[in-house]
Image (cartoon, rainbow, N blue to C red):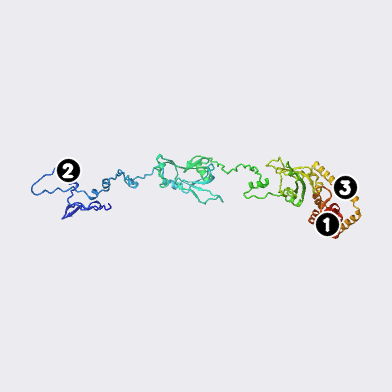
Amino acid sequence: KTAFHRSQTLGYRNGYAIVRRPTVGIGGDRLQVNQLSQAELDELANKAPILTYGEPKQAPPADFIPAHVAFDKKIFLESQGIELNPPEKMALDPYTELRKRPLRKYVTPSNFDQLKQFLTFDKQVLRFYAIWDDRDSMFGECRAYIIHYYLMDDTVEIREVHERNDGRDPFPLLMNRQRMPKVLVENAKNFPQCVLEISDHEVLEWFTAKDFIVGKPLTILGRTFFIYDCDPFTRQYYKEKFGIADLPPVDVSKQEPPPVKQELPPYNGYGLVEDSAQNCFALIPKAPKKDVIKMLVNDNKVLRYLAALESPIPEDKNRRFIFSYFLATDMISIFEPPVRNSGIIGGKYLGRTRVVKPHSSVDNPIYYSPGDFFIGAVIEVFGHRFVILDTDEYVLKYMESNPAQYSPEALSSVQSLIQKREAPASKLENKQTEEDPGVQELEALIDAIQKQLKDYSCKDNIREAFQTCDKEASGYVDRETFFKICESFNVPIDDSLVKELIRICSHGEGKINYYNFVRAFSN
């Protein structure tokens, strides 16, 4: 049912009230004409019908019930089977209750006159310097404030002290000027202070001037301030009013924290120790500083050594390596000359890097120096052991000019190497002089080439290259190797005198005596 219209049952005719029977009920259903009212049904149920003869008696009129009472919503809902909550009391209106109270009589006490206080202490303000130390909490800090106490009306104001580049908005006030409650009543804890102002009914005690003492903490609105100083007027006021003559300031200057010892993390094994340590010194690491004077003095100065790998594997016994020690940076590189049909790919074995000596600490590493390289020395490079077998001529000259850097054992090993080199060379020269009938012709040809190529002086380098290829120290190399070495040193092999010298130095098929050939290019 959707139509809940109620028909009017009360009408007036000629000034008399007339009850009208409704013809339409709830939901728009048609009511029967002879339907009895509830009062008539109750009367029939309680009284027995009386049979009368004659004119029928008119029923008495029903008791008058207004429509808004007869068709009350609560009654209707209860008739429909809907239970309602019991009635509640209406909320009291604070303003209405305030109007019911008798008028307050404002009587100024004789011992306190606000007007006199206003006139006496007008424009007189107590100034206190305080700090709020919140460093115990996460991201807390120590901030400075100025507390103003106005004597004219006992109000308090807290101002912030901003420093240059402190990263905060320049908001002047932390708390606006107002009276500050010190002790609240028990029932005032749930008072909505954020909506309504606190009055004397919720406060037992207010903050006064005697609560602000230099050197003591003060809690205002849940924040504890420490007062460490005040201005001269405040000192004079406390001396005259409370008899406190001495208010010494408290030193709250920021003390520098103890220096933190910077310790480098343990070395992880990647790169050099000095290079890895730069990540701990700056956010954007820079390359470690270099000795520029040493780099300029020793530029392009390289010490070369011939070494063998000390390994239990049989295939590694015949492997040879060339150590290059760069004096400018104290770095070492290792190169393995490729050998045909050896099954091992030669080439760069180790790039330029500083090699740490074994049994040295990680935090304070000790690197190899030129004094550690000599004939017979064992060099350990990242777990691989190498034995120094030979050196070049430049290393011998460097050791002669810098004997203080080398031990007596290193100098003696070099002397024995020089003696071994000179002995086979002298024997070979004597043998060639005895066997070769054209010695005079060879000497004349060598003198002519020396005069023609007097500016070409690379005898030592050519001799070293030939001796490196001559594994057996026989004084002979094959023709292919001979011409490759000559081409690498830009020897003018197309010259007629040089061709004649090569023809004289040829021995057998595919062999050339390089000793006499090298003599032609000496100084």
Dot 1 amino acid type = Tyr
**How far apart in space, not on screen, are marks 2 and 1 (Cα)?**
153 Å
Q: The residue tagged with tag 1: helix, strand or loop?
A: loop
Q: Quadrant of residue 141?
A: top right
**How far apart in space, not on screen, are marks 2 and 3 (Cα)?**
162 Å
**How far apart in space, not on screen, are marks 1 and 3 (Cα)?**
27 Å
Mark before the other along the chain sequence, 1 or 3: 3
Residue to which mark 1 is pinned: 456
Residue 179 at x, y percent in the picture: 44, 45
Question: In the rendered image, which quarter contains the C terminus?
Answer: bottom right
Mark 1 surroundings: few (<14), some (14-19) or many (≥20) residues within 10 A? few
Residue 122 at x, y percent in the picture: 46, 48
Residue to which mark 3 is pinned: 427
Question: Which of the two marks, 2 or 1, is nearer to us in this view?
Answer: 1
Mark before the other along the chain sequence, 2 or 3: 2
Residue to which mark 2 is pinned: 45
Return the residue nearer the eye: 444 or 188.
Answer: 444
Q: The residue tagged with tag 3: helix, strand or loop?
A: helix
Q: The residue tagged with tag 2: helix, strand or loop?
A: helix
Dot 2 amino acid type = Ala
